[in-house]
Amino acid sequence: MIEKTTHKIHFSNADDLSKVEDNSVSLVVTSPPYPMIEMWDESFSRQNKDISKALEKGRPEHAFELMHKILDEIWQECSRVLCDGGVACINIGDATRTIDSKRDGKKFQLFSNHARIISSFVDLGFSNLPNIIWRKQTNAPNKFMGSGMYPPGAYVTLEHEFILVFRKGNKREFSAKEKQNRRESAYFWEERNNWFSDLWELKGTTQVLSENGARDRSGAFPFEVPYRLINMFSVKGDTVLDPFIGTGTTSLAAIASGRNSIGYELESEFSSTIEQTLLLESNLELINNTIRKRILNHKEFINQRIEEKGIESVKHYNEWFDFPVMTRQEKDLTLQFVENIQKTDDNLFGASYVQEALLDYQGSHSLFSQV
Ligand SMILES: C[S@@+](CC[C@H](N)C(=O)[O-])C[C@H]1O[C@@H](n2cnc3c(N)ncnc32)[C@H](O)[C@@H]1O
């Protein structure tokens, strides 16, 4: 059972994670700035002036490589702080861009960020595990790029991003004492079947809120992305690191999952947005609704299963929740609602958890009591 978790944000360049000890992190979940996507040119160029020069001089391949060299240093730091068996999940999209190149004139091409990042992690000694395609369908009628209906000049539309999954070293080992916590960190059988698909569509995702729309301009991912990954690849009480924390979505998802978190962010002006992400009551409500929905979906799934199969019940029982589950591995599964989230110091937040097995939770907050 989890009583408290802590969430620290550092406003500095993630190429130096020296405030984080070697082997102290179990999971990295992050989405870096995407090389060769124009919205990130300025941020990369500020970190290395040669990048803007390469773009201006029409040397896109060189700019692409210099941008990835910046990310490489951060991947190396992630490798240092990850424990043996720790996992890194990197959300990245490829880029398409037309560049007026000195050598070739105007040229449209793909910059394969995901391939470049895979090779960086493999060079660092990680094993690449099966990756996830996150399909983000665009409905624009004119989504096809290039020369319309005349072959061969049209280009297929990029409608997906990747979530690359890497493991450092061997499979993680758990001591006898840690095994109970691992059992409590289980997910439901039917969730496993959905979450471990290599294609995520994530339609109708719930959005984390901020007051001034800052998230819209930040390249934030939806809450479900880090929430699933944290539940899939870490156990309760672990520390999750996001070296590109942006608006703080990964920390919110870590709170929802009973994990600690550390975030790094280069731009200190994100401070107030992160604070909103973590402290707005509506986001606490989002967390507890997510947990509530998992419990209700499970009950619905079991009822349907019983009806479809014409059986009395499924085979196993979860004593804590007092409801049936599909497998032995879900017998100790616990999901705890979040009681409150507070700022405890500069850039430090703490969350506390409800200690009872509740199927539903209205909380003591005004928003909950209105439900
Ligand atoms: C794609 S956004 C991350 C969005 C985040 N996943 C969210 O949900 O809000 C990338 C973030 O990395 C930050 N960043 C860029 N370079 C960095 C660096 N070297 N160290 C730390 N943060 C950096 C950017 O300022 C930006 O906020």
Image: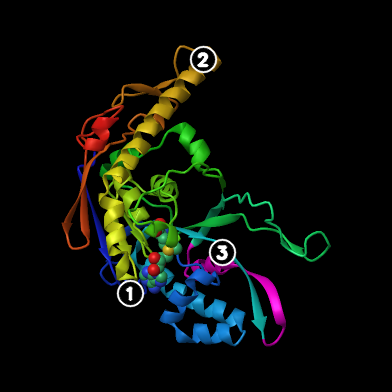
**Residue 29 image point, x, y percent:** 41, 57
Which residue is nearer to you in this view: 341 or 86?
Answer: 341
Which residue is nearer to you in this view: 19 or 135?
Answer: 135
Q: Residue at x 26, y 37 (%)?
A: 367
User: Is tag 2's residue or tag 1's residue first in the polypeptide sequence?
Assistant: 1
Q: Residue furthest left?
A: 345
Residue that badge 3 annotates: 114
- Do the residues under discs 3 and 2 have CB atoms within 8 angstroms? no
**Can residue 362 be seen here?**
no
In magenta stretch: residue 120: yes
Report which quarter residue 156 is drawn in: bottom right
Q: Magenta residues, as a range?
A: 102-126
- Please indicate whether residue 211 sits to the left or right of residue 41 in the image: left
Residue that badge 2 annotates: 307
In magenta stretch: residue 23: no
**Residue 144 image point, x, y percent:** 71, 58
Numbered marks: total: 3
Q: Secondary structure at mark 2?
A: helix
Q: Secondary structure at mark 1?
A: loop
Q: Residue at x 21, y 55 (%)?
A: 349
Which residue is nearer to you in this view: 47 or 99?
Answer: 99
Quadrant of picture, ligand 1: bottom left
User: Is tag 3's residue or tag 2's residue first in the polypeptide sequence?
Assistant: 3
Q: Residue at x 69, y 55 (%)?
A: 142
Residue that badge 1 annotates: 16
Q: Amino acid at mark 2?
A: Glu
Q: Amino acid at mark 3?
A: His
